[in-house]
Amino acid sequence: MLTTGGSNEARPSGAPLRDLPTNVPTTGGSNAVRSAAPPLQDVPSNGTPSIPLQDAEVAVRRSSRAPVPSTRLDRQNEIGTNVIPPQPPVSEAAVIEEPPWFAPAYDHLKNNALGPMWVDLVEKWAKHEHIKCWKGGKGLPAKGRPEEWQKWTSKARWGIRDYSRIPSIEDAADLGLCIINWVSSFNPADFGKAGLHGMVALLTLMAWWGTAALTPSSWNSDSRPQWQDLVQDLSNRFDTLLDEHLVSKRSLENDNTGEGPENKRSRTEAASL
């Protein structure tokens, strides 16, 4: 066992001594070391020097930047409270732009010659498209759809429909009968479909039907009453869709502000007192 200063007193047992540097000169015999040499330190048996707990965090940091304060305690304090965290601002880049097909379709459908009830229907459809962000799923059913639609859309170039070259409708009543039969096969969800292949197809066909029915010939039956009935039915359906969206929007706003039914009732009772 190594001794220092010529003393025969053994070092207390516990951990092996750290090896001394080989280049440290010695005086006073082989067992004596200079007083300037670093003092011996005890190390654990696994060979890793012990570090005080207060210096442990400083020892493991390699960055010179100040540590970021933790917000974990603040987040824990918010658990179980009714404090609504602020919502992040909506980025302008996240706003969906109007698709290029919508404006030509809207201008074509908004035909004042078809009457105010038709114009009101087109406005409701346009509002519904805006709410749905002009996006739809599969589209309206293809089975039973009037052939005039397929012939016209097949001539579109690069997906752009040419509203300056709409088909000529010789028999308005016949087209109207095809449209009514087609609509009768719709599911309730079909009337709310948006997008390029959604309700715009039905409204476009109805615009052709209504325009051709304005001047019925002597050998064609007058289909304007059937056209008006369908316009009224679709207008009522869009009213329902817009009302459902308004209710959903108000419910979402109440959830974000914490203004639930119980809070509203409490506020009303307090005001009455």
Image: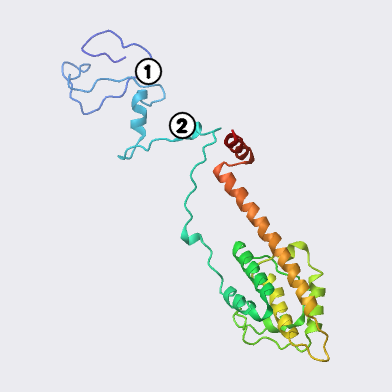
Q: Quadrant of residue 239?
A: bottom right
Q: Amino acid at mark 2?
A: Leu
Q: Residue at x 49, y 55 (%)?
A: 90
Q: Position of residue 8 (x, y in %)?
A: 26, 8
Between 58 and 163, the one lying in front of the other is: 163
Q: Residue at x 61, y 65 (%)?
A: 127
CA gap between label 1 and label 2 equals 41 Å
Q: Position of residue 28 (x, y in %)?
A: 16, 16
Residues packed near mark 1 inside 10 Å, few (<14), some (14 to 19) or many (20 plus): some
Q: Position of residue 131 (x, y in %)?
A: 60, 62
Note whether residue 51 is visible. Answer: no
Name the side, left or right, on which 240 lies relative to 157. right
Note whether residue 97 is visible. Answer: yes
Between disc 1 and disc 2, whose residue precedes?
1
Q: Residue at x 77, y 84 (%)?
A: 172
Q: Quadrant of residue 110?
A: bottom right
Residue designated by label 2: 73
Name the side, left or right, on which 83 lies relative to 182. left
Residue designated by label 1: 15
Q: Amino acid at mark 1?
A: Ala
